[in-house]
Image (tube, helix red, strand yellow):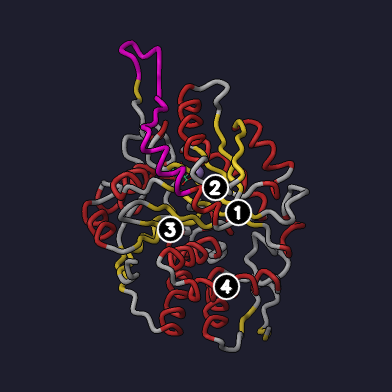
Amino acid sequence: MKKLEKIAVLPGDGIGPEVMAQAIKVLKAIEEKHKHNFKIKEALMGGCAIDKTGNPLPDETLKIAKEADAVLLGAIGDPKYADPTLKVRPEQGLLGLRKELGLFANIRPVKAYDKLVGLSPIKNVSGSDFVIYRELTGGIYFGKSGRNDDNTEGYDIMSYKKYEVERIAHAAFKSAMNRRSELCLVDKANVLEVSRFWREIVDEIAKEYPSVKYTQLYIDNAAMQIILNPARFDVILTANLFGDILSDEASVISGSLGLLPSASIGEDHCLFEPVHGSYPEGAGKDIANPIAMILSAALMLEQFELNKEAQDIYDAVDYCMDKSIMTEDLNPEVSYSCSQLGDIIESLILGEDIKVKSVKEGSYSII
Ligand code: IPM
Ligand code: MN
């Protein structure tokens, strides 16, 4: 097992730098408590990189990311570059990074916190605890695309190589073995040949994991089941575009997109980022929810088998959720700022007394 030492930090755009600052704060607390020595190197990616260099993924950033043991990413995207017809866009930086680092498995856990069950607009969220395994470096995102000569046709091809399906499928089945041993393949095999190809391969691989209950759902039905009965899912295995859509939908279960972390894993590299975007309207106001970013750092620790360290973060986050110590997206009545939440989680990890000022109350309260 590789040791976690060098961490490339890409704060990105919008609220990215603010939530990243909290994750770093928390990692420093973990470092202190568990006697680690993380070497953090910051680099530009996304809109901020276009501003400074004209390139959303500068060579220097790619080099730092490749040399690191892990990459932490905040968020990318800027209204300046929102026009999808622009030649140079922040998203290209992220897609380029995923491809260059070979991050084929995107893992997005979705969990309903008891205290937040009432906040979800979906009814039956209690007990939901599943994980989406989204293929990340293939499919329609990276297939042939273009227009015909007289611009009367546009296309993006969804194609997969056998090994691309195999490696994400194995990762998902292995995860299922460590969870409740259920895996649901989500596809559109009633229409798409590429989905029938996936099924053929995944059906075979399923035989290697006989203890895992293997099922299949069409994407349209799965989208409905996630709303109707989210607690029925354990591991969802799916292609790039389907996983992109389902994971945003699933975020509603937990009550806020601000709670969902993700891990992107390849053979040699790994990257951890919140599922949410750069929320430009909230940037610079210290109101963003840092939990998804902090939990992304916990996923990073787990990836390097620093399980006690990760557990410290989960415990601190659970404590905050339980005591309604939340940012305004989750608790508009008595909300804490992004940096206060970071401070509190830092104190919880270090076992210090928590003294925070509640934004709305305007007074110090000791919890
Ligand atoms: C995500 C995002 C990205 C994606 C965008 C920003 C390119 O939506 O990570 O889910 O579509 O993969
Ligand atoms: Mn997305």
Q: Is residue 297 left or right of residue 64?
A: right
The one nearer the camera, 67 or 236, is: 236
Q: Foreground mark, 4 or 3?
A: 3
Q: In the rendered structure, find residue 272 and report the number of the disc placed on it.
A: 3
Question: What whole-number distance in Å separates the C-alpha atoms at marks 1 and 4?
Answer: 21 Å
Per the image, the residue denoted by label 4 is 341
Disc 3 residue type? Phe
Q: Secondary structure at mark 3?
A: strand
Residue 351 in percent (x, y) is at: 56, 87
Verify CB contact (< 8 Å) between mark 3 and mark 2.
no
The one nearer the camera, 198 or 188, is: 198
Disc 1 residue type? Val
Magenta region includes residue 167: yes
Q: Foreground mark, 1 or 4?
A: 1
Reading the chain from its start, which is encountered first: label 1 or label 4?
1
Q: Foreground mark, 3 or 2?
A: 2
Disc 2 residue type? Ile
Residue 231 in percent (x, y) is at: 70, 50
The one nearer the camera, 132 or 200, is: 200
| Vertical relation: 195 (above or below) 25 | above
Per the image, the residue denoted by label 2 is 132
User: Which residue is painted at 63% across and 80% down in the image?
Assistant: 357
Magenta region includes residue 275: no
**Over which residues does the magenta segment extend?**
147-171
